[in-house]
């Protein structure tokens, strides 16, 4: 009975490791609704810049109008595929003040062009998050922002191989030690 329990635990660990992709980890950290909202903002920066003005902090709201002539050169076009490449957040709470901040990197690709959009959101107390900094960089090559995803996926695949091997090695060692102990007692 015990042997089946240990096999079940090992199988559960393997299943968890196999399911631990970057997107799965991101889904646990950022609600899918918030992910869709961020991706929509990034896409609209490229396809409909004036529609993003409401999300920009008033001090930088005019920057979107200044960028409109440059954005077509930097952006991948209407049929681009967008993905979250990096997300971090922090909250600072002191008496009478609650600050929230999110930093996001979104990558879009289409028509042989890559676009990296960096966004920084900030809110005080119960105010809604507003974009306080943004940047758009176009490129003909795959952006460095996606390297983290590649490294994460490679690391998870390595763990999915290494942990079962380690568990088998530990199980073999325990088995060998128990047999050795029993042989010494019998002798």
Image (cartoon, rainbow, N blue to C red):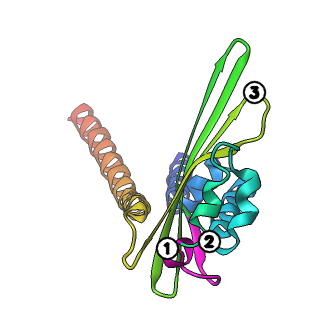
16 versus 143 height, above or below: above
Q: CA distance from mark 2 to mark 1?
A: 8 Å
In the rendered structure, the answer to whether residue 77 lies left or right of residue 170 reads right
The 10 Å Cα crowd at callout 1, few under 14, some 14 to 19, many 20 or more, is: some
**Magenta stretch: residue 169 in it?**
no
Dot 3 or dot 2, earlier in sequence: 2
Q: Which residue is mark 2?
A: 46
Image location (x, y in percent) of residue 22: 52, 59
Q: Are marks 3 and 1 in contact (CB under 8 Å)?
A: no
Q: Residue at x 29, y 37 (%)?
A: 182
Dot 2 or dot 1, earlier in sequence: 2
Q: Looking at the image, which is closer to me, 24 or 44?
A: 44
Q: Residue at x 78, y 34 (%)?
A: 127
In the rendered structure, the answer to whether residue 170 lies left or right of residue 114 reads left
SS for dot 2 = helix
Image location (x, y in percent) of residue 28: 64, 50
Q: Looking at the image, which is closer to me, 13 or 107?
A: 107
Dot 3 or dot 1, earlier in sequence: 1
> Of tags 3 and 1, which is closer to the observer?
1
Image location (x, y in percent) of residue 120: 57, 46
SS for dot 1 = helix
In the rendered structure, the answer to whether residue 48 lies left or right of residue 120 reads right
Q: Which residue is mark 3?
A: 125
The mark found on residue 74 in the picture is: 1
> Of tags 3 and 2, which is closer to the observer?
2
The stretch of residues the image draws in magenta is: 70-83
Quadrant for residue 158, please give it: bottom left
Q: Looking at the image, which is closer to me, 75 or 183?
A: 75
The 10 Å Cα crowd at callout 3, few under 14, some 14 to 19, many 20 or more, is: few
Q: Residue at x 39, y 68 (%)?
A: 143
Image location (x, y in percent) of residue 150: 40, 65
Q: How many marks?
A: 3
């Amino acid at each position: 009975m015990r042997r089946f329990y240990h096999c079940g635990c090992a199988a559960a660990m393997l299943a968890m490791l196999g399911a631990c992709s970057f997107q799965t980890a991101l889904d646990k950290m950022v609600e899918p609704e918030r992910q869709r909202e961020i991706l929509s903002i990034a896409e609209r920066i490229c396809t409909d810049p004036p529609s993003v003005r409401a999300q920009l902090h008033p001090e930088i709201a005019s920057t979107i109008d200044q960028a409109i002539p440059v954005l077509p050169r930097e952006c991948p076009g209407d049929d681009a595929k967008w993905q979250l490449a990096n997300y971090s957040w922090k909250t600072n709470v002191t008496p009478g003040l609650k600050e929230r901040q999110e930093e996001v990197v979104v990558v879009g690709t289409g028509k042989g062009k890559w676009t990296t959009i960096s966004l920084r959101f900030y809110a005080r107390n119960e105010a809604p998050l507003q974009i306080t900094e943004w940047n758009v960089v176009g490129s003909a090559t795959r952006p460095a922002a996606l390297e983290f995803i590649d490294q994460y996926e490679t690391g998870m695949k390595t763990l999915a191989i290494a942990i079962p091997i380690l568990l088998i090695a530990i199980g073999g060692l325990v088995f060998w030690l128990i047999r050795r102990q029993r042989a010494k007692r019998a002798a």
